Amino acid sequence: MRTTLVDPRTGRVRGTAPVARESEVRAFVYLAPTVALIVGNPMGGALMELDSVLGLHGWQWMFLIEGLVTMLVGVLVWFSLPEAPRDAKWLTSEEAGILSARAAGDGSEGENRIKGNLKQAFGRPFIVIVAVIYLLNQITNVGIVFNLPSIVEDLNIHGSFLIGLVSGSSGIGATVGVLLVPVVHRRFGNEVALIGILAGATAVTAAIFVVSSSPAVQITLIAVSMIFVFGTLPLFWSVAMARMSGLVAAAGLAFINTIGLLGGFLGPYAFGLAEDATGNPGAGLWVVIACSVAGVLLTPLLANAVRDEDAAEAPVPVSP
């Protein structure tokens, strides 16, 4: 289904888009990190087994080999990625024009400058709340990913390769999440409510992990929790992108990313503090519970902010 909207304040058509499938399309971008978890964990474990080969530690081999592959991919992208939609050989001229127009926005030149539009880019309540919920999600996400090998080792699983192989199960759950949740979103319709439901499911899964004593059950629960944690990611951008465009959208998304990705630092740090306090790597799941419950509590605020945002825009359907 395609929706055409007009802003009555300006008379401009805000554009058409297959709204129901937006999160599904974005989900494919997240297949990169989820598949990397499946492949990278056992690969890293195998490279760690090269300890003392040619006088290098296993972690040094891991950094050298994985770093070299990353550099080669970077060079490939530099020479093969088109500079703009018009340079993409797989797009028709019409498709390239549509993408360029959407990237630039349909407003006036003044509306597509950050100067004078700082509130539009950074100060709108729904943007701030999305950024905070994204931060909580990333504390959970990165905390689990970085500390999972320690958690697995604490479950009496030994050997770098085996630990990496078991840790890769988190990537299986994450891959299921980014593929399945957008399909559920298309049928469910309300992405804000779904964000809250997924946060609640994460909290419940982490709580069961904390009270469980079975290593097999605990590993399974972590994989299941990653379905909810990673499955939420496409929904954030579905909420944000539907309400921003042009240069203001670029600045707003940068703001959301900047706040959210602080979780890359805070997550492992919080997990480390929990482990230091208890001596148990699995204690970091209390951090997951706390962040997930906070995310659930913020969901009604996000719903109200989105409702106010949509009311202010006041789009009305028009015939194509």
Image: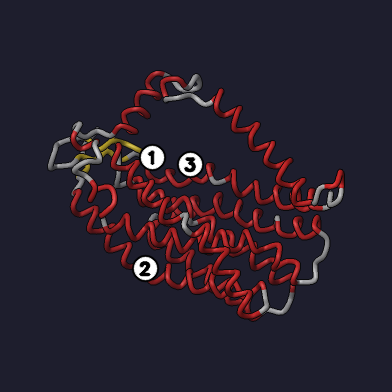
The residue shown at (24%, 37%) is 113
Q: Which residue is mark 1?
A: 18
Q: Local crowd at mark 1 within 10 Å, few (<14), some, or many (≥20)?
A: few
Contact check, label 3 and label 1, Cβ < 8 Å: no
Q: Which residue is mark 2?
A: 298
Q: Is residue 313 left or right of residue 271?
A: left
Mark 3 residue element? helix
**In the image, residue 141 lies at what x, y percent?**
55, 60
**In the image, residue 69 lies at what x, y percent?**
68, 36
Q: Along the polypeptide, which appears first: circle 1 or circle 2? A: 1
Dot 1 amino acid type: Pro
The residue shown at (83%, 60%) is 159
Q: Which residue is mark 3?
A: 25
Q: Of 154 and 313, which appears nearest the observer?
A: 154
In the rendered image, the quadrant that contains the C terminus is top left
Q: Of 109 and 186, which appears nearest the observer?
A: 109
Q: Local crowd at mark 3 within 10 Å, few (<14), some, or many (≥20)?
A: few
Mark 1 residue element? loop
Mark 2 residue element? helix
Can you tell which of label 1 and label 2 is closer to the viewer? 2
In the rendered image, the quadrant that contains the N terminus is top left
The residue shown at (18%, 41%) is 7
